[in-house]
Image (cartoon, grey):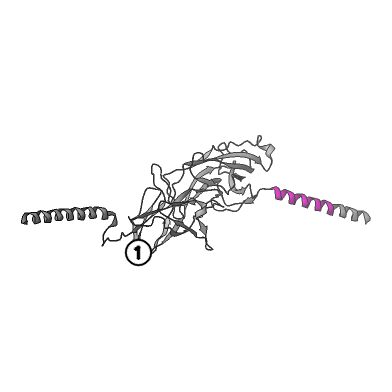
Amino acid sequence: MKLNKKVLSVGLALAMVMGMTTGAMADATPTRPDTTTLVTSDGTVTIQNTMHIDKNLTVPNVSYDYATTYIAYNNDTSKITEKKVTVPGQKTITFSSTDTVSDNNTVVKSVLLDLTKATAGYPSAGKYTFEIVETRNETGISGTIEHTDTQKYEVAVYVENKTADDGTMDRYVKGITIYNEDTKLKVNGVIFDETYSKNDSLIVTKTVSGAMADLTKEFEYTVSFTSIPKTAPAGNTITYSPATKVTRDSAGNYIFKLKTGESVSFDNVPVGTTYTITEKQDRDFTGALDITYADGTKEATATAAKGVNITATDKLIKEKKTGTTGTNEAKFTNTFEDITITGVVTNNLPFIMMILVAGASILGFALISIKRRRS
């Protein structure tokens, strides 16, 4: 009886060990992953690159290469020689200046990576792990490209055995899983993101005209920048010069004064930003405003009567195009209406006196001559 209890105890212990071992083996067995967007169960993978760019910008000429490396078989890096697989060649996605930016400020491109047979085929059933790495070719661009995405993805291809119609054994790709190597989390696809932005400037200039205008008079301006693109770099700061002329109010508006011949420049303004500018008018001056753009275009002149403020609303900071010489500029011209002269101009008085004296002399000489004749 005691022996039977001992045998029973040993049997239970062995059963527990076998159960634990079986569980561990089950955990190591590849299972079919969830089917998700951009991932197909046949072993093809779509590599997608989305460039976020304001629609007022020209798409830069850049390209991105994607190399695929076979790194492990059943999570064992030492098995890649034994379970040799020849991977597909490098894939490339290219953006160019002829691309059209969508209304949601993106350009989306993709390329297909076929891991169905990994070129030479899979030698046996199991889990084959690949790494996809992005190489960025972004030299020579005039703007800024920011990256918040990973440059590496891990793709696991699950291969299972199957019986062909003729009774022979074959293999097929049952499914794949994709992991972001930065977060180590399962993701829906091999997706890369690039954010392109570019800055330009806004110049505000002042001209006063009129022969009798006070050229020392200053006019006050208020500038506000609105609708700054979401693609602008984080921490981008608009600067201005001369810095001593400009102040900021509680609402963030820029306040400054200019007299004829002076100007203020706002720099590091993201292309696609809009601005509103107002000139506080003087009762003795009429106003005119010309808006020009960096792409060489301009708007019709806006005018204001004496004492009426002149405002331009939601004007765009545009990109300087290749071969153009334009600037984003607000040109203000104020004209003083000259006073009509109704009396004697003192500048001409000496000449008038000379004429009067000459006339009086002639008249006096004539009178003397007449008097002599009568005598």
- Element type where label 1 sits in the image: loop
Q: Amino acid at mark 1?
A: Lys
Q: Position of residue 24 (x, y in %)?
A: 74, 49
- Residue designated by label 1: 306
* Residue for point 52% across, 46% down: 145
Q: Residue furthest top?
A: 81
| Residue 46 visible to the viewer | no
The prevailing secondary structure element of the residues shown in magenta is helix
Q: Position of residue 46 (x, y in %)?
A: 53, 47
Look at the image and say whether residue 195 sits in the magenta stretch.
no
Q: Position of residue 158 (x, y in %)?
A: 62, 46
* Residue for point 46% across, 50% down: 201
Taking the image as shown, residue 1 lies to the left or right of residue 21, namely right
| Residue 179 visible to the viewer | yes
Taking the image as shown, residue 132 lies to the left or right of residue 261, namely right
Q: Magenta segment, which residues? A: 12-33
Mark 1 Cα shell of 10 Å, populated few (<14), some (14-19), many (≥20): some
